[in-house]
Amino acid sequence: TTMHAIKQNISSLKRRIENSANQCGRDPSSVRIIAVSKKHNLDSIKAAYDQGIRDFGENYLQEAIQKIELYKPKNIIWHFIGPIQSNKTKLIANNFSWVHSVDRIKIAERLSSQKNPDLPDLNVCLQVNIDGETSKVGFSKNEIMTVIPYLQELSGIKLRGLMAIPKFRTTMDEQRKPFYELQQLFMRISNQMQNNTSFDTLSMGMSSDLEAAIYENANLVRVGTDIFGKRP
């Protein structure tokens, strides 16, 4: 995708977000775009950065680390959003600001114990298996309520919120259901955590279901195709 196309894509994405936010009475600036840059090159990332994007999401560790080491503009924020194998936790903990795909206790524990204590706390979203699919990773809705108090105590990581990747649905009404459930779960956890103001993030919605997610209060949306075009 040419740099010009990426520029066009980002401005139409911003319009989409603005329209949705306005329709449901939200401030458009409360929705942050994470550009999902996996499999895209540094030129594409630079083009998005030049359009004001500061958050980039990567799924594959080796590929991501190469980019992170080569490209260090001011205020760039790297998000790890892919599946996490245990043997990758140390590199993830020490190279990313955010991790969205913490799907089991063991992963949270490893990120906590392996992070360099001199680095800022790692921002963590817990991945919820919102549709209860047997093939999908993530905490179940019941399980997550019981593990929160323990995860809150882990050093070096800061629980920021929840993430989900619902199964594909076609209509807006259908798309909103799992996002609504995630939002309800988020509220229950927030209430349980009482005065924890840093638990503030719903990471949900992608190119195809962005509007539905914004209606249900998403504040981090993960967009790849609609910024960078099809993956090479």
Image (tube, rainbow, N blue to C red):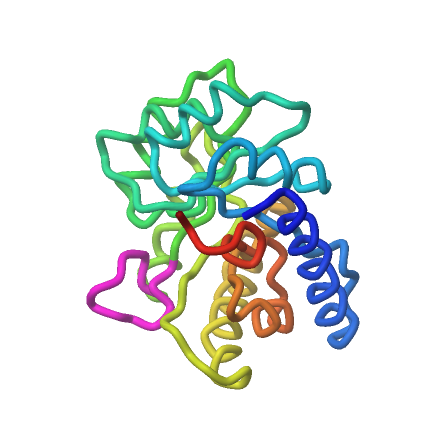
Residue 132 magenta: yes
Residue nearest the observer in this picture, 115 or 227? 227
x and y, in percent, of residue 55 in the image: 60, 40
**Magenta highlight: main SS:** loop
Whole-percent x, y for residue 204 in the image: 51, 60
| Near-viewer residue (28 or 38) | 38
Region rendered in magenta: 128-140
> Against 226, is 48 above or below?
above
Q: Residue at horizontal 51%, vertical 18%?
A: 119
Please indicate whether residue 44 sits to the left or right of residue 15 in the image. Answer: left
- Of residues 5 and 200, the one drawn nearer to the viewer in this rendering: 5
Would residue 203 be found to the left or right of residue 214 on screen? left
Residue 34 inside the magenta-drawn segment:
no
Query: How many marks overall?
Result: 0
Q: Is residue 30 left or right of residue 72?
A: right
Q: Which residue is drawn at 26% across and 62% down?
A: 136
Vertical placement of residue 132 versus 30, above or below: below
Residue at 51%, 69% (x, y): give it: 208
Front in this rendered view, residue 115 or 164:
164
Vertical placement of residue 63 versus 180, above or below: above
Q: Which residue lies furthest to the top in this view?
A: 118
Q: Position of residue 210 (x, y in %)?
A: 58, 67
Residue drawn at point x = 46 percent, y = 41 percent: 40
Residue 152 in picture, x, y percent from top left: 45, 41
